[in-house]
Amino acid sequence: MAARFEAAGYATVPFGTPCDVAVIHGCTITGKAEHSSLYAARQAKRTRADTLVILAGCPAETLGETLRGDTTVDLTIGQAGKFAIPELLHRLYPHRFPAPATSEDTVSTPRFDTQRALIKVQDGCDFHCAYCIVPTARGLPQSRPLAEVLAEVKKVTAAGFREVILTGANLGRYEDGPHRLADLVRGVESLPAVERIRLSSLEITTAEEAVIDLMSRSTKLCQFLHIPLQSGDDGILAAMGRRYNTDTFRRTVTMAVEKMPFLGLGTDIIVGFPGENDRSFENTVQLIRDLPFSNLHVFPYSRRSGTRADTLPGQVQESVKKERLHTLVEIGETKRRLFAERFVGRPVSVLIERVDTNGTGHGWTGEYLEAHVTGASLSPRQIVTMKVDEVDSRKGSGFGVQGSVTSPFPGRDLHAARAGLGRLAD
């Protein structure tokens, strides 16, 4: 969206700065997130009364009708129109907003806040989990054509990005004719300028088996999987409307770790879902202890109007949610530290995100460990091999790793380094 505005002749400024147009691209996954989006819109209007405030994305889909006549939000623009706002502004307010300097179908190179390029390949979901508003906000699954995705990847790598992240509302549902997610990954991997590929969250029962097999053999695909669990209790999973049970989840993770002993494994957990009692929570705790997670994202259940879970009996007290959240966060920190310790003395690849004034590089390993690297002439977007010397256990570090550069790390050499890790694991 920012790239479209800039291509149309606008300048982007930090939020809170007086401006002609303020776009709030909000979230509606929870009621709290939705309220935060509206709060940001009010902030923008207070900064300058004549600022045109636009609420875009999911909140526009869920709140559009209710905001008619609202004096804070001037326009609501949903998913379909959010990438053509400059053109829309000129059509609606031709005397205030000039015609874009580029045509509407000009595809701009996106702007990113990281040194990794995010490539959205899919949107929408039809799983209708009991707690989730995404199917209402995003609609049915739809995927971008494979050729279009590859063209965008070529564009961002030509702009200097060396790692791309493939994302989607339900990434595993990617489908372009006969092509599925694994086919898309193979296509991206075939592009010479791409050195690392990372996947966003992948729902179980979609494309995980093919992806795990490809990941175990790939020279470019980062060995990190984020597979949402949400609960470790079969009764709660059924109430949530999830499409698997704990045995299925356990088998999938076991298969992945057998193929990739040093796999980074992330998951999402919701605590305090309606009906979650002490026993079902303990089942969740036990499953998390049993499986080799390296990243836990734990959330207290938040009631969301428009979802089935909002009217379920057995709503859990907020104080209980907080206790359970604290328990899982502590377990997650311990598991992340133990995972990081496995890499001490071993080589990892690191994409440098930034370099501080002391010359220390900061970035991420392929397994999604935060890394702090010492070495000569480091620069953002550089991929290096780092020998891990120790675990960074400073408060707030998230148990990352520290070490020194041993050599530049082109993506084509990733397989050799992984082979070394495999031998050490054996």
Image (cartoon, grey):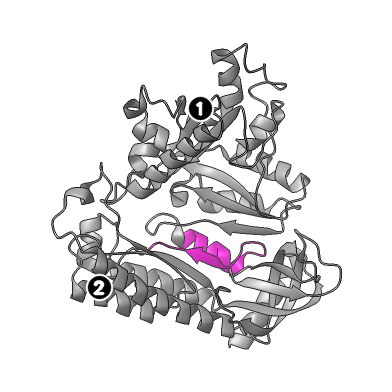
Q: Quadrant of the N terminus?
A: top right
Residue drawn at (18%, 70%), measured in percent from left and top?
277
Q: Quadrant of the C terminus?
A: bottom right
Provide residue 280's location: percent of width, then percent of height: 21, 72
1 or 2: tag closer to the N-terminus? 1
Q: To which residue does mark 1 refer?
A: 81
Provide residue 171's location: percent of width, then percent of height: 47, 50
Label drawn at residue 281: 2
- The picture quadrant where one finds residue 420 is bottom right
Report the span colored magenta. 209-229
In this picture, residue 136 sits left or right of residue 339: left
Provide residue 403's location: percent of width, then percent of height: 72, 80
Q: Amino acid at mark 2?
A: Phe
Residue drawn at (60%, 46%), measured in percent from left and top?
119
How far apart are the alpha carbons under marks 1 and 2? 42 Å
In the image, residue 85 above or below residue 290: above
Are the residues tagged 1 and 2 within 8 Å (C-beta)? no
Q: Amino acid at mark 1?
A: Gly
Label drawn at residue 111: none
Badge 1 crowding class, 10 Å Cα cut-off, few under 14, some 14 to 19, many 20 or more, is few
Q: Is residue 275 visible?
A: yes
In this picture, residue 403 sits left or right of residue 367: right
